Amino acid sequence: MQSKLILTTVSIAMLTLSSFKNSPEHHETVGEKENTSGVYQGGPKELIGKWVMDGDPNTYIELRSDGTVIEKSLGEPLKRYWLLKDSKLCLKATSVEGGTEMCLEYVLREDMLEITMNEMKLHYARFKE
């Protein structure tokens, strides 16, 4: 449990320290595709929804259809922007010009989402109300 807390804290720190550029109107659509291992990568429509971290129901990401994402881990939820680029999930802190973006490998298997950050795999399950 402590390793997940450290991992979550590192993830939030990395995203918070990054300044990003772009806004929802730049939301890029990447076609759906299947990779060589047969795992369905999925497109933006399949990623939309709330994803809860495996083993920590208080940590989640909510990818919205308007290009915004709400991230919740420690403290208050943070609003950011998201898009798919080159088969990666890219997150942006703000719409301020001149920033950078963080693009992460992801694998979508039905209602399970795996995001790779710094060689660590974070597992999320689709939230079902």
Image: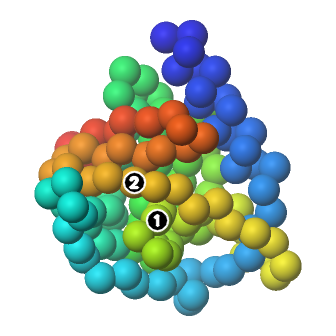
Mark 1–mark 2 distance (CA, rounded to whole Å)? 6 Å
- Amino acid carrying mark 2 in the image: Tyr
Q: Residues within 10 Å of mark 2 (few under 14, many from 20)?
A: many
Q: Are marks 1 and 2 in contact (CB under 8 Å)?
A: yes
Q: Position of residue 123 (x, y in %)?
A: 37, 36
Q: How is the image coloured?
A: rainbow
Residue farthest to the bottom, as pictured: 25
Residue at the image position 35 percent from the left and 39 percent from the top: 124
Secondary structure under badge 1? strand
Camera-side residue of 53 and 50:
53
Residue farthest to the top, as pictured: 2
Q: Position of residue 48 (x, y in %)?
A: 33, 64
Mark 1 or mark 2, earlier in chain:
1
Q: Position of residue 103 (x, y in %)?
A: 57, 62
Residue at the image position 40 percent from the left and 84 percent from the top: 29
Looking at the image, residue 14 lies above or below residue 102: above
Looking at the image, residue 105 lies above or below residue 60: below
Q: Is residue 46 visible?
A: no
Identify the mark at residue 106; answer none if there is no mark: 2
On-image quarter of the C terminus = top left
Q: Position of residue 64 (x, y in %)?
A: 42, 66
Residue at the image position 44 percent from the left and 36 percent from the top: 122
Identify the mark at residue 20; answer none if there is no mark: none
Camera-side residue of 81 and 90:
90
Identify the mark at residue 88; answer none if there is no mark: 1
Looking at the image, residue 64 lies above or below residue 127: below
**Residue 30 relative to residue 5: left or right:** left
